Image: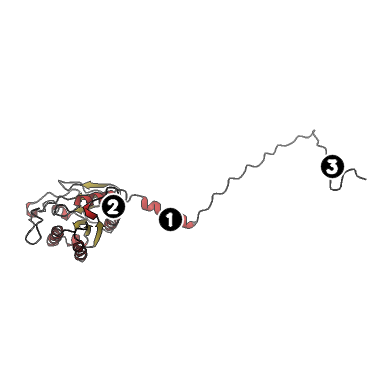
Amino acid sequence: MSEHPPGYEAEQPVDLSRPVAYQPLPAPEPPAPARRPEGRKEKQKKATEEAAPEAVYGLVTVANVQPRTFKSTVARKLYAGLEPRHVNVRLWNGVGTIRLDGLVVADMPADPHGTDWRRQSWTTDQLVLPIPDDLHAARAAWWMLDRLAAEGRPDLVSTAIVVGIQTGAHRMLGRKIAKTFGERTAEVIRVKLPGGIVPADDEARWDPLVTAVSHALKQLSSRSRPAMLPPRTPNQVVQLDSRRHGKAANQ
């Protein structure tokens, strides 16, 4: 009779006279990376592509010969929005001359004689017209479109983007400006600035304008453009007629 209980196996003696081969334990396998859904990968790829600056070439002219039309504000906000989206973006005060490589946003002087904005109309790729709810500003902008059409740039008129500044001073006039200019230009983007006050840290209200200008520049067909703006010529001086277009020439 066995002295061990059932199921018990006696330990076999170990032969120490035989060399024992060392067999290291296998290294643990690294954990498999978690698989992300394909939809998430596509979204991340798309977001990266959208965030990367893109090369766009052109001259964007922000102009209204009537003073106090928020022209410089529109130019600065447009530059601030385009600069992260595109490479080599510059803001120019519209005086003198400038190289036309890259993307230039021109804040043109409010000059009723038209010596600056009309000089560069031959090289402008995109016109942006800021028009607050003010009758003189609207008449001056309409006169500018008339001059451009008469002087051989009707394409600037049809592709122009109007920025309707809504200060709340004349709401009915603001709606009429949007309707009237919307029938003649490519688009009217309305920006609310209650009381004519421009918030310093509110860039979201300018996003529709930045997107519209960026999209318009991408749609431009390539054409030969001079490296520098042409010099000013005397026959480009035309006084704004205040009898037909308000008092823009005298204020």
Mark 1 lies on residue: 43
Residue in the foreground of this view, choosing between 64 and 226:
64
Horizontal arrangement in the rendering, residue 197 relative to residue 13 (left or right)? left
Question: CA gap, disc 2 to disc 3?
Answer: 85 Å
Mark 2 touches mark 3? (CB < 8 Å): no
Mark 1: few/some/many CA within 10 Å (<14, 14-19, 20+): few
Q: What secondary structure is marked by label 2?
A: loop
Q: Which residue is pictured at 40% across the width and 53% down the height?
A: 47
The residue shown at (19%, 63%) is 177
Residue 3 is situated, as x and y percent measured from the top left of the image, at: 90, 43
Which residue position holds label 3? Answer: 10
Q: Could you tell me which residue is drawn at 58 percent across and 47 percent down?
A: 31
Q: Which label's residue is closer to the chain start, 2 or 1?
A: 1
Label 2 sits on residue:
56
- What is the distance, in whole Å, between disc 2 and disc 1 at their CAs? 24 Å
Depth order, front residue of 200/143: 200
Q: Position of residue 156 (x, y in %)?
A: 19, 59
Residue 72's x, y, as percent?
20, 50
